[in-house]
Image (cartoon, rainbow, N blue to C red):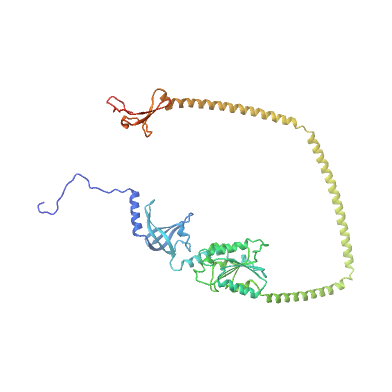
Amino acid sequence: MGDSQFSFEFSAEAPSRRIYAVHELVTTVRTHLEKGFPDVWVEGEISNHRPADSGHIYLTLKDGDSQLRVVMFRTQARLLRFRPQNGMQVIVRGRITMYEARGEMQLLAEYMEPMGAGALQVAFEQLKAKLAAEGLFAAQRKKPLPVLPRRIGVITSPRGAVIQDILNVLRRRHQALHILIFPAQVQGESAAAEVSAGIRFFNQQAPQSEFAVDVIVVARGGGSIEDLAAFNDESLARAVAASTLPLISAVGHETDFTICDFVADLRAPTPSAAAEIVIRSQQELQETVFALRERLRRAAQFQLLSARQRLTPLEKNRVFARMEDAISRRQQRVDDLRFRLASLMRTRLAGASSRLDLGISRLRQRDLRQQLRMREQELLSRMEALSSSIQRSLLRQRSRVEQASGKLAALSPVAILERGYSLIFDQRGVLVNDSTQLNPGDPIRARLSRGEVIARVESTLKPGPGTQEG
């Protein structure tokens, strides 16, 4: 080409190329993805939501014409405050990786929250709708409170101001009341489980137990929706619904509502209000009892006076004498029927006893010994037949074993040694079948038909052209 800056070289060798195995390429791509996107936030709409029995959550995030598969393992999924649903707009945090079995890119989610309303509010509405559909909020399942409870169980924090407010109100309203406090956390991850344990504890007490109560009060002061999250827990709601004792929910301030409030038999706007609701004041009870007693005394006097006025003219009427005579005649008829019934029963019992004695007599006259002898002979005959069959089977099995033993002995390496052969092993115990495995001076061990020989190699000969190796 003269002065041209291009030159061509021809080679007989093909250019080198890198060929990946499928697994190797997928693993390499996954490594680059995980290094490049270790922590990302993705926004999209949920579709193909599939919760698995293992606790893992599988779904797809879509946005326009694009979609991304998402997997949230059980450890992270159980921390969700709401239930993901198809069509819900969410924000997901996680890392990009690749599912090697299908070669698909996916997002391993570690956190998820709904867009717009907070996760706690969404979880509250979802759980409220679910439990309402099951009938846990129905008025007909609410239990009435006892009018005058002797013992009240309070589930709350023993160190807060709430328990002091409740005790002050109860002491002021009734002095002879017994209060049992079940200490429990009312905020945090363990709060729902501890409050549920308190409800189950009071329900499991026998009536004569010193820890038995007539009504339960679950109490907590006010706070944000995050502070009251424990009382929106499904397990706590079901523990409240399962309580056989009447239960009052006194959680938060008057404007605060929790799932526990809806399931409980009664909601109190504040813990102090719960103390006023659960027991009427001693003075009020005394006034009520006095008023009821006075009303009862006046009503009884009026009824007695009215009855006396009605009965005075009637007691002189001859109709009462005729009624007494009619009752006496009917009583006589009843006595006559009773006597006839007793006589009939005695006659029937005597006939049944006679038939029973006849049957017993006939049964004793029947000889059963002959039938027993026949059954014994039949049994002996069958046992002899079974014994003969077992012996024949044992003989056949013994013959087969002896034939197999003969074949095994013929094929045994020891039988080959009986013909004058031996097995040579080097100092490591490896069988020698080639002279090149040994060197002069090496110790060897020869296995004969009977016994062994220890020797040392004087020299080795390589196999010649006419020598067969092996």
Q: Nearer the viewer, residue 279 or 265?
A: 279
Residue shown at 38%/26% (left/top)?
A: 422
Q: In the picture shown, does residue 136 fall above or below 435?
A: below
Q: Nearer the viewer, residue 99 or 84?
A: 99
Q: Is residue 179 left or right of residue 447?
A: right
Q: In the picture shown, does residue 153 fall above or below 334?
A: below
Residue shown at 31%/28% (left/top)?
A: 458
Query: Percent x, y for residue 40?
Result: 37, 62
- The answer, for residue 269, to whether it is visible in the render is no
Q: Is residue 98 left or right of residue 183?
A: left
Q: Nearer the viewer, residue 306 or 322?
A: 306
Q: Quadrant of residue 366?
A: top right
- The answer, for residue 75, to whether it is visible in the render is yes
Residue shown at 90%/68% (left/top)?
A: 318
Q: In the picture shown, does residue 466 fall above or below 358?
A: above
Seen as rendered, the residue at the extreme left is 2
